[in-house]
Amino acid sequence: MKQLLIISSSADSECDSIHRHLVKNKVSFFRLNADRFHDRYAIEIDPGHSTFKLTHRKTGASITESTVGAVWWSRYALPGNTHQMFEPHLREFIDEEYYSTLIAILSCLPDTIPVLNHPIKHYIAGHKAYQQKVAVQCGFALPNQVIANSAASYLNKPWHTNAVYKPVSNSQYITKNKQQFFATVRKIDKPLLAAIRLNKIELHIHHFQEQIEGMEEYRVTVFGDCVMAFRIDGAKGFDWRLSLNDLHYTHIPNFPVAQNCLAYMKAMDILFGCFDIIRSKQNGYYFLECNAPGYFLFLDPKGKHNMAKQFTSYLIALTMQNNETPVN
């Protein structure tokens, strides 16, 4: 019987939820919490012969390259107490070592083994500029936008008085004091626009985008042939992520651009993605970005729409398709 290999962290609540469903369905799986590499697992990898064995030190449970039917890369995290385990200047080195070890595990698997959220594929799929290109190819409409490092390149756009700016790629950064911050989307209001016009702000490189006057925003989760769209209700301001505690979500069956989402997944060659889409006052649907991977179970916290169950069934189907014997 093939096993599902889950790569996660011990603080991954979404994985915990799916974990419970897998246990209920009596699915054979091995969960590797990367933040406990150092104390909970015995790891042996032979890249030259494409073999590995992972063993849980306490339970004795193990998995090898020959027993893996599918992989779900859920979350990756370093141990929370690395500041106590390692010298400060070694943290980045250890992070790279842990991450590369996980890549080594995946590299031992045949290409026929499906990997949900493969980090190499998602490195490419995560770049926003590339996302825009693929989205257009898949029939999506996009807001007007420009990536630039000069005020003139932005100010000469007819939509510059109704715009937002955001990071070109990564939305998080680490300060010199090792504090983590998130660079969120920000509206260019009148004071900020005036400062840009007067050259009181030095521009580095920014992704400027026309703000679509939207009626509704959607979070659309796609895995396999399943497209689950939810309207985001109760947002205060233009970025719903800034008011998470005030939100509720409405399931939208037969989402109008579902086929565009499926085409995008195929073009990107990914198995899971969370789309941010907005509907304008003119009833046009605009692609903003696709988070691959992204959080999704918060959309159905009480399980009313069986989101966790459907995702679990998808993981089981991926794993079972590589069984050598039929499954009743």
Image (cartoon, rainbow, N blue to C red):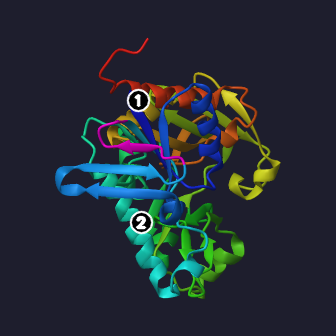
Q: Position of residue 165 (x, y in %)?
A: 57, 66
Quarter of the picture containing the C terminus is top left
Segment tinted magenta in the rendering? 59-68
Pick the residue in front: 201 or 26.
Answer: 26
Element on which disc 1 rests: helix
Q: Is residue 20 above or below residue 164?
A: above
Q: Position of residue 293 (x, y in %)?
A: 49, 48
Would residue 64 be counted in the magenta stretch?
yes
The earlier-in-sequence mark between 2 and 1 is 2
Which disc is residue 98 wearing? 2
Q: Amino acid at mark 2?
A: Tyr
Q: Position of residue 312 (x, y in %)?
A: 55, 30
Residue labelled with disc 1: 318
Q: Is residue 251 above or below residue 217?
A: above
Element on which disc 2 rests: helix
Quarter of the picture containing the N terminus is top left
Residue 278, quarter of the rendered image: top right
